[in-house]
Amino acid sequence: MREFNLIDGGVAANNPTLVAMGEVTKAIVGGSSDFSPIKPMDYRRLLVISLGTGTGKVEGKYTAHEAAKWGVLGWLTSGGSPLIDVFTQASADMVDFHLSAVFQALHNDNYLRIQDDKLSGVLSSVDVATKKNLNDLVKTGEALLKKPVCRVNLETGVCEPTPNQETNEEALIRFAKLLSQERQLRHAKSPHGLANSPK
């Protein structure tokens, strides 16, 4: 019998997008046949979709003036658990900020982050699995598809709608088309694809 001692991956990578990109980079460096000749850091060739699980609305929950007076207990209990909120939010937000900076520097819109950070009540809970809450989460996700794509403003750190007014749904459709075209191209170049193509 084997024993596994596991911990939630969010402890180390609350937004695992960089972890996934690291795995792709390792595969490229390792010479995986899944990647046509591509340089490990050629992010222009990547399509990155980062789907958040949603977070509670935190604006105005506490101020810097209030936090300056907290001791250890205050950081653990004031208005919830601020210390945990800061660790989880900051780690996820820094990944988004970093990737936004990289893809904006490349003038490339192949990075899409979809996240709702204005959930409230039980919707923002990680452990309420009632039928009603699950249905409400589905509705929240469907509404999120209709919202405009947002990108981090590198000056303010605030997520703002992109100038082209593309919705999350339209961006996902655009990505799906690019992936389909890439698959067709790979299939056409593959010896197996050529052997199976109609004559």
Image (cartoon, rainbow, N blue to C red):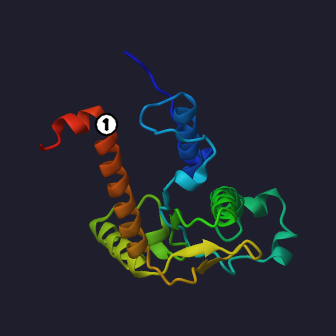
Name the image quarter holding residue 78.
bottom right
- Name the residue that disc number 1 marks: 190
Image-based side of 26 in relation to 2, left or right: right
Q: Position of residue 34 (x, y in %)?
A: 42, 36
Query: Which residue is at the front of the view, 18 or 110?
Result: 110
Q: Residue, x 69% and y 81% (percent of image)?
A: 60
Q: Position of residue 170 (x, y in %)?
A: 39, 75
Q: Position of residue 105 (x, y in %)?
A: 70, 64
Can you say which quadrant of the picture contains the C terminus?
Answer: top left
Up/down of 193 relative to 75, above or below: above
Q: Residue, x 31% and y 37% (percent of image)?
A: 190
Report the amino acid beneath label 1: Ser
Image-based side of 195 in relation to 48, left or right: left
Within 10 Å of disc 1 (Cα), the crowding (few <14, some 14-19, many 20+) is few
Asked whether residue 14 appears in the rendered view, the answer is no
Query: Which residue is at the front of the view, 194 or 129?
Result: 194
Query: Which residue is at the front of the view, 11 or 122?
Result: 11
Asked whether residue 54 appears in the rendered view, the answer is yes
Image-based side of 92 in relation to 141, left or right: right
Farthest residue in the top direction?
A: 1
Query: Which residue is at the front of the view, 174 or 186?
Result: 186
Q: Residue, x 67% and y 55% (percent of image)?
A: 91
Can you say which quadrant of the picture contains the N terminus?
Answer: top left
Farthest residue in the front direction?
A: 199
Q: Position of residue 7 (x, y in %)?
A: 54, 38
Name the image quarter holding residue 173.
bottom left
Q: How many marks?
A: 1
Image-based side of 164 in relation to 82, left or right: left
SS label for mark 1: loop
